[in-house]
Amino acid sequence: MTGKAKPKKHTAKEIAAKLDAATTNRGGGKAGVADRTGQEKGGHAKYECPHCKTTAPDVKTMQIHHDARHPKIPFEEDKLVNRHATTAADSSKSRPGVRGSLKK
């Protein structure tokens, strides 16, 4: 006898989930550093907080960050650092994608 209702084999759903987790770029590790820090134009980190240097993809997210982390300082949109404006575009490199497949 095997045990108390323990499945002997993996389900197709479980195998598909493991395959998806192994082949999808989630933006972590060395591959996502440039994307998270906004070093290359096209990354998701467009704006930088002038107080703590944290990056965010848009103004609304930066305002949420500012309200949570710097509540005593008034939010001024014109003081945000646009990292895409300061970095030159390199057309030879592909744009980073968070949800792209690593292997086809």
Image (cartoon, rainbow, N blue to C red):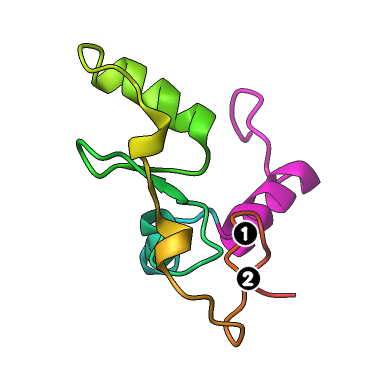
Q: Is 27 left or right of 93, judged from the image as shown?
A: left
Task: Identify whether 3 is placed above or below 15.
Answer: above
Q: Name the residue under label 2.
A: 102
**Residue 9 in view (yes/no):** no
Task: Identify whether 69 is placed above or below 78.
Answer: above
Q: Is 89 left or right of 13, judged from the image as shown?
A: left
Going from the N terminus, do you reach mark 2 or mark 1 first? 1
Secondary structure under the numbered disc 2 in the rendered image? loop
Secondary structure under the numbered disc 1 in the rendered image? loop
Q: Name the residue under label 1.
A: 24
- In terms of depth relative to the viewer, which is nearer, 69 or 14? 69
Q: Residues within 10 Å of mark 1 (few under 14, many from 20)?
A: some
Which amino acid type is marked by label 2? Leu
Which amino acid type is marked by label 1? Thr
The answer to whether the residues at label 2 and label 1 have Cβ atoms under 8 Å apart is yes
- In terms of depth relative to the viewer, which is nearer, 37 or 77? 77
The residue at the point 56 percent across, 64 percent down is 42
From which residue to which does the magenta span run? 1-25
Residue 66: % across, % down: 33, 24
The quarter holding residue 33 reads bottom left
Q: Which residue occupies the extreme bottom position in the image?
A: 92
